[in-house]
Structures are given as structure tokens and as C-alpha cells.
Image (cartoon, helix red, strand yellow):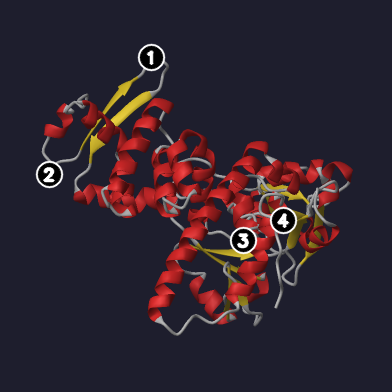
């Protein structure tokens, strides 16, 4: 059993954080009391303490976010840092970033969270609601939403109001206006479009239930975040998805079977799908005849996979192979889809790296630039499947104890 002695007034932030870490480790190893009543009381006290820790965490994240320090560590964004180094889910990472970035505009929320009078759930809900508001509306929204908290509304209800906070503020001020389009019926879909003076276009409309289902089914999958560094909100991603569909970029998904040419022509070597699922040679030949299935020949056939130094850019055939081998960026922990990545010469084309399939990998644009400007921080290995894995090391002048740097590396 460890012991902790801390002079709270004189201790540094690092000493306090280390003390909390020691106490948390000890607490995690304890058994809960036998009394259910005591468990409830202790859980409420611990939750309040956790909320206060969230206040301190938001301050730390906010400072790191504003400085862009994570980029020196090979991480393209604050969200990527929280996901890869702190193990947060995407939704939790976005939640904490919103709170960190909005705290200075929400003084009352920040104060109540720090004193334990407001839970983290409510604080993060208010922060998310004001993200796209100007400072004046932000102040009004903070008051409206905190009034709801005082009235006993649940965090879910506060979040629902937060999504339409502009309308709530207008209703409170008596400045709301009824859109004439709201008077239309709900059985028929409609869309109106007007061009702005700068060449853009305003679009508004209504979709009935049937057309809304088509909208969701078509644009929903295309409007997902492109990766950990995708800072666009849902409305921006939806606009990009719609534009892609209108431009003809929406293509039906195809199944890809990876195999040798001999397998398709009667050989016995097994094949596999892009997710690694092994299939027999007979199955590969059978499903390769189906519509929507693309056989991918590795290193043989009519696809030029080895180009040496004759050309710098990978061919479409090589790109197809690489997108199959690299579902995401080659950098460990980066989740940018391979289809959105750039083809990277592992050894650098300018210094002699050939444009051969076994010397190429897929790397997102940010990490591709980072690799070529910070080569000393990137370690490259080849795993058992033949794929390259890029590992980003801490910056050489990182202000951290040697043991921490060794563990990070």
C-alpha cells in the first residue's frame, strides 16, 4: 500500500496530478463496501470529484489545443491525441474538446463545474450547444440552459433544447418569425434554391418520410467523418456528400477478392477478402464471376505493379492494391481511410525509392508531410502481412522524464 503526502497550497500541478493518480490506483484496487447505501453515497461523492477533475482536464486540454503541441508529436489534431494517447472514443474526445474550447465563453459553467455544483454531463452539453454561436448569443444560451438545469431538466432534455438554441433565444426575446414554408403540407417533398451574390447557393426544403429514407440511406454513410482530423461538423459533411453524389462520385460498393492469377485459372492457392477473411480457391473462382465483384491480382496479370524509377506516381492498378492492403493510413493510430490517403514512397522517391508496389504505402496528407519533414521521428517496420507500419516517436526535445519518453517510443 502506497502513501501520499501533499501540501495542497504549495504543491505544483504535476505533484497534484501525480497524487490523484496514486490515490485512484489505490481506490481502484479496493472492494466496494457491503452496504448498498454506503455505495450510493460514495458513488455520488466520487462522481462529484470526477466532475471537478474534468474541469482541470478541460483546462489542460485547452492549453495543449491552443498551442498545437500535439503536432510536434506526430499527431494531426487534438482529437487524434485524445483518441490515440488517452484512449477516448471519438464522441468523448469531441465532447472534451468542445468544453475545453468554450470554457472561456462560459464563465458561469466553468465556475460551477470547478466547484462541483454542475456535473460534467451538463457542462459538456452546454458547451456543445454554443459551439456555433457568436459571443452575444453564447451568453444568452448559457443563461437559458443553466436555468433549465436549475429547473431540474435532464441532461438529455437540455441537449435537445441546445440543438435549437437559436430558436429558444429568439422566442425568449420575442424576435422569432414564422417561415412561410412551414405552412406547406408534409405529404409532398419540396426544395427551393436561390443564388447568392458571391456565386453560392442557398438551399432549403422538406422531404417526406419516403424521400427522407432515401436521403438517409444515400448520404448517411457518405457524411461520416473522413478521419480523426476531420474538423467538419455534420452539416458540412452532409453538403460535401450531397455534392459528391450530384457530381457522380457515388458508386456502388464492390467486393474485392485478393488472389494470385493461378487461383483464378484453376490453382489451389487460397484467396482472401479485404478484411482478411480466407476463402478457398474454388470459392474465389465462383464469387469472382458475380456482378459487383472485382478480382485483385497481386503481382501478376496485366496490372503493372513494379515501375522502378520510370515514373513517380503510382498507377490506378497500384492504388487499387494499396487501398486493399491499407484500409487506413499506415501511421499507427491514424484512422484516415485509405481511400482518402496519398501514395507514399516508403524510402522517398527523391532519394531513390522506386515506384514499386512493395515500396509503397498509403499515408494521409498530414502524416505524409510530417514524415518527410520529421524523418527522425518516424520508425518504419513491416508486419507479418507485408504491410508497412509507421510509428511516430516523441520529439527529441520533449519536456518529459526519460522513462516516459522510452515508454512512448
Which sits earlier in the primary sequence, circle 3 or circle 4?
4
Q: Residues within 10 Å of mark 1 (few under 14, many from 20)?
A: few
Where residue 244 appears, as percent x and y from the top left, is 44, 40
Q: Would you name the residue on which mark 1 appears? A: 197
Which sits earlier in the primary sequence, circle 4 or circle 1?
4
In this rendering, which labeled residue sits more in front, label 3 or label 4? 4
Please tell me whether residue 152 is drawn above or below residue 1 in the rendered image: above
Q: Answer with left or right where residue 391 lies relative to residue 159.
A: right
Q: Would you name the residue on which mark 2 appears? A: 187
Please tell me whether residue 272 is drawn above or below residue 212 in the rendered image: below
Marks 4/1: CA–CA distance = 58 Å
Q: Residues within 10 Å of mark 2 (few under 14, many from 20)?
A: few
Q: Would you name the residue on which mark 4 appears? A: 15
Marks 3/1: CA–CA distance = 44 Å
Marks 4/2: CA–CA distance = 64 Å
Marks 2/3: CA–CA distance = 44 Å
Query: In the picture, which quadrant includes the N terminus?
Result: bottom right
Instruction: Tell which of 377 and 318 is nearer to you.
Output: 377
In this rendering, which labeled residue sits more in front, label 4 or label 2? 4
Instruction: Tell which of 56 and 367 is nearer to you.
Output: 56
Q: Answer with left or right where residue 52 lies relative to residue 169.
A: right
Instruction: Tell which of 135 and 304 is nearer to you.
Output: 135
Residue 249 seen in this snapshot: no
State the SS at label 1.
Answer: loop
Which sits earlier in the primary sequence, circle 3 or circle 1?
1
Amino acid at each position: 500500500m502506497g502513501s501520499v503526502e501533499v501540501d495542497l497550497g504549495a504543491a505544483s500541478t504535476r505533484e497534484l496530478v501525480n497524487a490523484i493518480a496514486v490515490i485512484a490506483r489505490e481506490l481502484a484496487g479496493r472492494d466496494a463496501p457491503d452496504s448498498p447505501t454506503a455505495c450510493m453515497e460514495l458513488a455520488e461523492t466520487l462522481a462529484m470529484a470526477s466532475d471537478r477533475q474534468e474541469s482541470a482536464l478541460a483546462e489542460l486540454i485547452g492549453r495543449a489545443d491552443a498551442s498545437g503541441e500535439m503536432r510536434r508529436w506526430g499527431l494531426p489534431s487534438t482529437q487524434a491525441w485524445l483518441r490515440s494517447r488517452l484512449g477516448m472514443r471519438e464522441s468523448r474526445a469531441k465532447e472534451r474538446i468542445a468544453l475545453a474550447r468554450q470554457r472561456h465563453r462560459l464563465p458561469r459553467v466553468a465556475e460551477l463545474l470547478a466547484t462541483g455544483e454542475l456535473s460534467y454531463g451538463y457542462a459538456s452539453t452546454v458547451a456543445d450547444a454554443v459551439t456555433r454561436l457568436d459571443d452575444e448569443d453564447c451568453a444568452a444560451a448559457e443563461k437559458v440552459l443553466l436555468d433549465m438545469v436549475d429547473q431540474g431538466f435532464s441532461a438529455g432534455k437540455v441537449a435537445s433544447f441546445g440543438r435549437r438554441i437559436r430558436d429558444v433565444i429568439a422566442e425568449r426575446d420575442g424576435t422569432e418569425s414564422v417561415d412561410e414554408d412551414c405552412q406547406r403540407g408534409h405529404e409532398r417533398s419540396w426544395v427551393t434554391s436561390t443564388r447568392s451574390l458571391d456565386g453560392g447557393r442557398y438551399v432549403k426544403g422538406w422531404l417526406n418520410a419516403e424521400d427522407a429514407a432515401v436521403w438517409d440511406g444515400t448520404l448517411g454513410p457518405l457524411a461520416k467523418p473522413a478521419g480523426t482530423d476531420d474538423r467538419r461538423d455534420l452539416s458540412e459533411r452532409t453538403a460535401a456528400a450531397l455534392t459528391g453524389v450530384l457530381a457522380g462520385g457515388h458508386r456502388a460498393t464492390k467486393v474485392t477478392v485478393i488472389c494470385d492469377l493461378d487461383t483464378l485459372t484453376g490453382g489451389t492457392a487460397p484467396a482472401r477478402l479485404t478484411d482478411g477473411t480466407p476463402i478457398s480457391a474454388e470459392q474465389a473462382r465462383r464469387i469472382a464471376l458475380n456482378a459487383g465483384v472485382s478480382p485483385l491480382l497481386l503481382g501478376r496479370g496485366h496490372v503493372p505493379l513494379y515501375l522502378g524509377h520510370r515514373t513517380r506516381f503510382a498507377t490506378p492498378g497500384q492504388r487499387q492494391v494499396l487501398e486493399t492492403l491499407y484500409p487506413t493510413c499506415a501511421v499507427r493510430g491514424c484512422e484516415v481511410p485509405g481511400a482518402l490517403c496519398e501514395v507514399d514512397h516508403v524510402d522517398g522517391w527523391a532519394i531513390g525509392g522506386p515506384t514499386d508496389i512493395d515500396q509503397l504505402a498509403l499515408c494521409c496528407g498530414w502524416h505524409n508531410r510530417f514524415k518527410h519533414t520529421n524523418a527522425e521521428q518516424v520508425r518504419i517496420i513491416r508486419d507479418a502481412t507485408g504491410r508497412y507500419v509507421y510509428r511516430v516517436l516523441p520529439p527529441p526535445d520533449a519536456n518529459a522524464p526519460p522513462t516516459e519518453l522510452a515508454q512512448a517510443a
